[in-house]
Image (tube, rainbow, N blue to C red):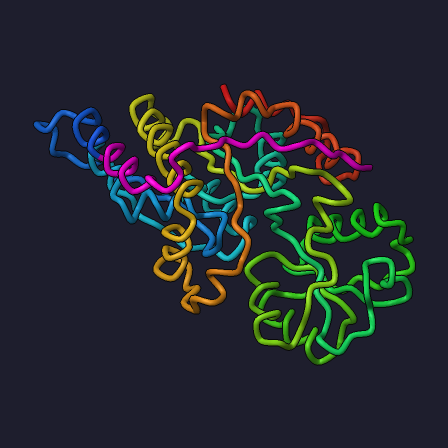
């Protein structure tokens, strides 16, 4: 099953004047956000993953975009969507700042009208989130050479397994001829370099890191976007309905600041990359400069992309990752 839709991109006539635009945005937030006489801060806990999918949140924090609204953010780090979703359900966090759409959709089907979606990442062929890599001395030249070989997938989830299987199928490779090996992020690169697997399907920045060590090379730069769907919805910013953050004034504040943050990411990639050192631990400048960036949909852009998002949700349902169909509009209301 393959969907190929040209992503809608915003263009900025004055891309290199982004710093001025951000300063003006911040000034507007400061003057229009909240009555200065209101000094009580509202604490809001937000879960995040230390990767590129959390960039809008990193911008919001680094520029104190929520401060004019009287919102004090408490960040909590999680290494995966399942862990973050558990924290959201238990009330440990109010907002999931980088939760995978499949995890959120599954939770929404279990409890309708549970989550509210405010923004969503979209990977493309030019800005992929998943790559196939092989050891530097591998004789494999393309994805079709994986027949009869082993392919690790990291992180070790049913979702990364499905993406690997359907990428193989879309490229004309019978997935039954490939041995799929689930690998944790901690051991995936070691397993590849040690030839314990012939290839590895992994998320960024893992692929960029291993390629820059000169121990591996790219086998396919964008398998998911090439053989399954382009663009591909990925990770979203979700508020738990009925929770402390599910108030009109807080939702409005996050809609405004997410829009400002995403505009900054689009128009100032170098500045955004530097935030990965502070907030995600990607301290090597070479890695930061070469890893692909991900685009994000602002709150106002989400309604125009529901057809693309619903196509992906239908794909998940048809492959038994979701128990039933789900209309993303349910999570936008």
Which sits in the foreground, 106 or 163? 163
Q: Residue at left 10%, top 29%? A: 36
Assess whether residue 258 is covered by the magenta stretch. no
The residues colored magenta run: 1-26
Quadrant in which residue 207 is drawn: bottom right
Q: Quadrant of the N terminus?
A: top right
Q: Is residue 152 visible?
A: yes
Q: Is residue 182 visible?
A: no
**Drawn side of residue 186 relative to residue 224, left or right:** left
Position above or below: 117 against 136: above
Q: Residue at left 46%, top 61%? A: 288
Total residue callouts: 0
Q: Residue at left 71%, top 29%? A: 311
Q: Work out which residue is located at the far bottom of the displayed protein and give it.
A: 194
x, y percent for residue 120: 52, 36
x, y percent for residue 170: 84, 45
Position above or below: 239 against 292: above
Quadrant in which residue 198 is drawn: bottom right
**Drawn side of residue 83 relative to residue 265, left or right:** right
Position above or below: 258 against 130: above
Assess whether residue 14 is covered by the magenta stretch. yes
x, y percent for residue 307: 65, 23
Which sits in the foreground, 232 or 323? 232
Q: Work out which residue is located at the far left of the displayed protein and give it.
A: 37
Q: Residue at left 78%, top 44%? A: 227
x, y percent for residue 246: 37, 27
């Amino acid at each position: 099953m393959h969907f190929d839709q040209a992503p809608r991109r915003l263009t900025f006539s004055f891309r290199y004047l982004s710093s001025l635009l951000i300063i003006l945005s911040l000034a507007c937030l400061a003057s229009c956000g909240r009555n200065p006489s209101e000094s009580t801060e509202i604490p809001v806990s937000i879960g995040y993953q230390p990767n590129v999918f959390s960039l809008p949140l990193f911008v919001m924090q680094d520029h104190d975009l929520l401060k004019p609204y009287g919102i004090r953010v408490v960040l909590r780090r999680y290494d995966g969507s399942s862990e973050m979703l558990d924290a959201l359900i238990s009330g440990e966090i109010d907002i999931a700042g980088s939760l995978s759409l499949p995890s959120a959709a599954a939770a929404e089907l279990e409890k309708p009208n549970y989550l509210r979606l405010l923004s969503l990442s979209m990977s493309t062929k030019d800005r992929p989130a998943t790559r196939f890599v092989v050891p530097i001395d591998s004789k494999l030249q393309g994805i079709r050479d994986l027949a009869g070989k082993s392919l690790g997938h990291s992180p070790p989830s049913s979702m990364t397994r499905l993406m690997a299987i359907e990428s193989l199928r879309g490229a004309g490779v019978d997935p039954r001829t490939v041995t799929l090996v689930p690998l944790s992020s901690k051991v995936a690169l070691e397993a590849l370099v040690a030839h314990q697997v012939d290839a590895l399907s992994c998320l960024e920045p893992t692929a960029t890191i291993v390629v820059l060590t000169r121990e591996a090379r790219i086998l396919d730069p964008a398998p998911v976007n090439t053989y399954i769907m382009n663009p591909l919805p990925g990770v979203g910013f979700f508020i738990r309905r009925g929770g402390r953050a599910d108030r009109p004034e807080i939702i409005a504040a996050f809609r405004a600041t997410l829009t400002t943050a995403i505009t900054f990411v689009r128009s100032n990639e170098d500045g955004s990359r530097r935030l990965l050192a502070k907030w995600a631990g990607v301290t090597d400048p070479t890695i930061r400069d070469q890893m692909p960036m991900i685009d994000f949909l602002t709150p106002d852009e989400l309604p125009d992309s529901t057809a693309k998002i619903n196509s992906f949700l239908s794909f998940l349902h048809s492959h038994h990752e979701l128990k039933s169909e789900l209309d993303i509009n349910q999570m936008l209301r």
